[in-house]
Image (spheres, rainbow, N blue to C red):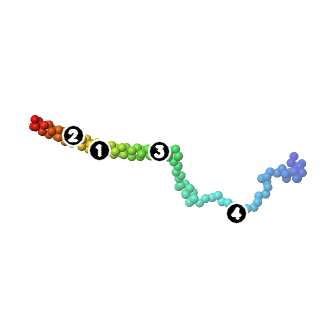
Amino acid sequence: MAARLPAAFRAAMRPATTLPKPSISQEARRSFQTSRTLLADATVTTTRRPVGAFRGSLFGFLAGSVIAGGALYYYVIDEYKVSNELLTEDIYALQSAVQRIEGYVKRLEEESKSKK
């Protein structure tokens, strides 16, 4: 059947792959080869997996909470010791004042008995 068609139709029905290829010199062709050093560099490099935002923020929050809690604990303990020392000093001062007053009262009682 193709032999019965005129030559113009046969040329139009030819597939596009039968078109003549442009001549490219051997030097102009692109080479897809790589050297051994480039291949060796490609296999040596490893990529680190980045830390995810969720894991990083969770770790940061926990670390900050622990540090702040520890600092607060030591601050509260230090303040407790200072206030406890002040209270103890006040108690000793009150005790000595009561003993002095007790001594004055005993002396006054002795003086009042001796005058009678």
Dot 1, how many residues are within 10 Å of its Cα: few (below 14), some (14-19), or many (20+)?
Answer: few
Task: Please state which of the two labelled residues, at mark 2 or mark 1, is closer to the viewer.
Answer: 2
Mark 4–mark 1 contact, CB under 8 Å? Answer: no
The CA span between labels 3 and 4 is 60 Å
Name the amino acid, label 2.
Val
Residue wearing tag 2 = 98
Task: Please state which of the two labelled residues, at mark 2 or mark 4, is closer to the viewer.
Answer: 2
Quarter of the figure that contains the C terminus: top left
Tag 1 or tag 4, which sits nearer the N-term?
Answer: 4
Q: Is residue 30 left or right of residue 39?
A: right
Name the amino acid, label 4.
Ala
Task: Please state which of the two labelled residues, at mark 3 or mark 2, is closer to the viewer.
Answer: 2
Mark 3–mark 4 contact, CB under 8 Å? Answer: no
Tag 2 or tag 3, which sits nearer the N-term?
Answer: 3
The CA span between labels 4 and 1 is 94 Å
Give residue 54's position: percent from left, percent from top.
52, 44
Name the amino acid, label 1.
Leu
Residue wearing tag 4 = 28
